[in-house]
Image (cartoon, helix red, strand yellow):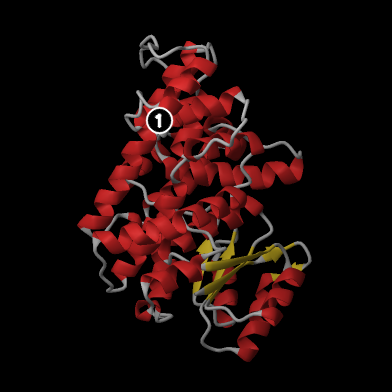
Amino acid sequence: MKSLIIEDDELVGELLETVLVGLHPGMQVTLAPDVRGARAALQDSSFDLVVADWNLPDGSGLQLVKTIRSKDQDLPIVMVSGRSDRDSVLQAAHYGISAYITKPFNVDVLHKRLSALLKVRDDGVSSRTPVEMLASYQGHIVQLPGAIDVTEVLDLITRRDQLSPAQLAERWRDQTGILARLLDVSNGASLRRSGEPIQTLRDAISFLGIPMALNYVLALSLDVSGAMQSPVLKMLADRYRDMTLSISKEAQRLALSLKKSPFAFQKAALLSRVGELAVLRVLNEYVLQGGSLDEAEAEECLRTWAQTFGNELKVQWRLALELRERIGAVHFLPNGSTQEDCLLMRTAALLADGKTETDECRRLMRRLGLGSNQQEVPDNASAN
């Protein structure tokens, strides 16, 4: 399924994209910042949904709707605007829009309105095999499964004036999906504005602003298909989440032993299994569409596709090279590697996997100057 978002505010466009991908995993979203870009996109491709801002830098989104309607009477079109007066709503309705949503968005309402529109358009995904579905999702955004409680986020929104980026970063420190998405959208804007990447969850929240960050998290929490729909997939998702948390704890201990700040290493640990989580997210959609698979089939998909999805996501999210190298070291350390941060991450992965007595782990511990009898370090640091 394909959607076109026409919105000149980059962060608002990314928020709309987050909601749409949560409603329909594998959704192919095209973002156009103006009328010119939208016309080019419409000429090059067909879409199942169009979301258009009214006021655009080079023209009126309403006139664009008129053009679209002259060629397609059935395509769902949603108009978004800061205009909430009755005359504006009636003027937009005259052009045959499917829904009118005012800014600033109530994400819950936005989710419900878009969900109702998408339910009537089915792309027949249920006829695909798991492998075909995984192949079709390559190159597109896959939101990671999470366990974010909607009511908790709504409560945070009501108290947003009392919250700080540091408090939210602490609350969400173990939520890989939140970390990944907020780093993704903040880096997209930051790199274009200053060329400097954003490295921490707290900095991402500060950059976006607390209200916008909460809206993104609410959109993720409303992604109901992110909850695993079969015991096999839930078991595998829990396994990989537990794995990343174990690596994070070991990385914290090692970092503190070496008098390093643990935050960067904990973040790398939390992101070290995003490929597996993305594969499980797609397989979950397969189950939602009526498919079934056993543990052996799911494991085979993970072995075949996890690295591919993981590499694509790290590029999509514009992760800094240093972070990508730390993540990669969890899985494999090239011969002759001398970067202490990478040695630390590989050691943390081995310790978390119970491979303390292996030759590789002992060798890495010596290279870190810790020896095999590493002093226990209390868990008194938190991810950022």
Residue wearing tag 1: 350
Question: x and y percent of residue 238 in the render?
Answer: 29, 44
* Residue that lies at the very extreme toward the front in this rendered image: 359
As drawn, is 143 to the left or to the right of 84?
left
Q: Residue at x 43, y 80 (%)?
A: 123
Q: Nearer the viewer, residue 231 or 62?
A: 231
Q: Is residue 108 above or below residue 179?
A: below
Q: Is residue 218 above or below residue 83?
A: above
Q: Nearer the viewer, residue 340 or 265?
A: 340
Q: Amino acid at mark 1?
A: Leu
As drawn, is 319 to the left or to the right of 113?
right
Q: Nearer the viewer, residue 28 or 328?
A: 328
Question: x and y percent of residue 200 in the render?
Answer: 56, 31
Quarter of the rendering containing residue 358: top left
- Mark yes or no: residue 384 visible: no
Question: x and y percent of residue 21 in the render?
Answer: 47, 62
Across the whole image, how many numbered discs are drawn on residues? Answer: 1
Quarter of the rendering containing residue 149: top left
Quarter of the rendering containing residue 245: top left
Circle 1 — which element?
helix
Q: Residues within 10 Å of mark 1 (few under 14, many from 20)?
A: many
Q: Residue at x 46, y 51 (%)?
A: 275
Q: Is residue 37 above or below residue 211?
A: below
Question: x and y percent of residue 162 in the render?
Answer: 45, 27
- Mark yes or no: residue 245 visible: yes
Q: Residue at x 52, y 33 (%)?
A: 201
